[in-house]
């Protein structure tokens, strides 16, 4: 009888030990997952800095910019080629592949040129195409200077 009792007690102890162990493991697990999520262990060190640099530089090969310029190329083909010529090398309107423009080659000036026109015969497109299309055209015109 005595022996039996001792054995039951021992069994009980092992079981509650196990339960404590499991509880501790669970707590450690939760803490680790929490720390993982909060601390940014999940990102490689420095990778967010690298990403930031890439975003702020927006290099010419950037996909969104390229897509916009491609849309601009299409519009140019229908709206501008008649005067500026195939490959924008000039016709009635000036060659747009040169590095300096009479009215400036900044994004702002090119936008103004296309939107409002210029007195020497450049028509205004502000009422014919929407803002996004003008942005595409500007993006395309900017790429022209990179054509050798
Ligand atoms: C009717 C003919 C004509 C059409 C169509 C035309 N242009 Fe022009 N464009 C000209 C002329 C002419 C000039 C020169 C204006 C001046 O010197 O005052 C010019 C000037 C420009 C300039 C300024 C160049 C500089 O040296 O500052 C840009 C940029 C330009 N055009 C872009 C475009 C784009 C983009 C389109 C199509 C959306 C377009 N043009 C359509 C005739 C045209």
Image (cartoon, rainbow, N blue to C red):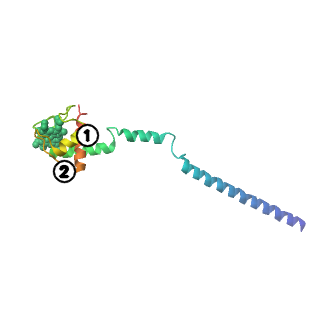
Judged left or right of residue 12, residue 97 is: left
Indicate the quadrant containing the C terminus: top left, top right, bottom left or bottom right: top left
Q: Quick one: 67 or 135, which is closer to the camera?
A: 135
Task: Give the residue displayed 72% in from the left and 58% down from the top.
Answer: 20
Q: Nearer the viewer, residue 28 or 133?
A: 133
Image position, residue 1 (x, y; %)? 89, 68
Q: Which residue is mark 2?
A: 129
- Work out whether 3 lies above or below 59: below
Image position, residue 93 (x, y; %): 12, 37
What is the x, y in percent for residue 15?
A: 75, 61
Residue at point 82%, 63% (across, down): 9
- Per the image, the residue denoted by label 1 is 107
User: Is the CB of mark 1 within 8 Å of ligand 1?
Assistant: no
* Count of marks overlaid on the render: 2
Ligand 1 - quadrant of the structure image: top left
Q: Mark number for residue 65?
A: none
Crowd band around label 2 with a 10 angstrom C-alpha radius: few (<14), some (14–19), many (20+): some
Q: Determine the residue positioned at 38% across, 40% down.
A: 56
Please tell me whether mark 1 sits on a helix, a strand or a loop.
helix
Q: Secondary structure at mark 2?
A: loop
Drawn side of residue 5 relative to residue 112, left or right: right
């Amino acid at each position: 009888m005595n022996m039996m009792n001792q054995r039951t007690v021992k069994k009980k102890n092992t079981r509650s030990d196990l339960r404590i162990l499991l509880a501790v493991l669970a707590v450690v697990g939760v803490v680790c997952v929490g720390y993982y999520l909060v601390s940014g262990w999940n990102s490689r060190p420095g990778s967010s800095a690298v990403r930031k640099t890439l975003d702020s530089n927006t290099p010419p090969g950037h996909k969104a910019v390229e897509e916009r310029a491609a849309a601009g190329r299409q519009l140019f083909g229908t709206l501008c080629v008649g005067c500026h010529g195939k490959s924008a090398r000039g016709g009635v309107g000036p060659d747009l592949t040169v590095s300096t423009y009479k009215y400036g080659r900044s994004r702002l000036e090119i936008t103004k040129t296309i939107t409002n026109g210029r007195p020497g015969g450049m028509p205004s497109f502000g009422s014919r195409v929407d803002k996004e299309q003008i942005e595409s055209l500007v993006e395309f015109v900017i790429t022209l200077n990179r054509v050798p």
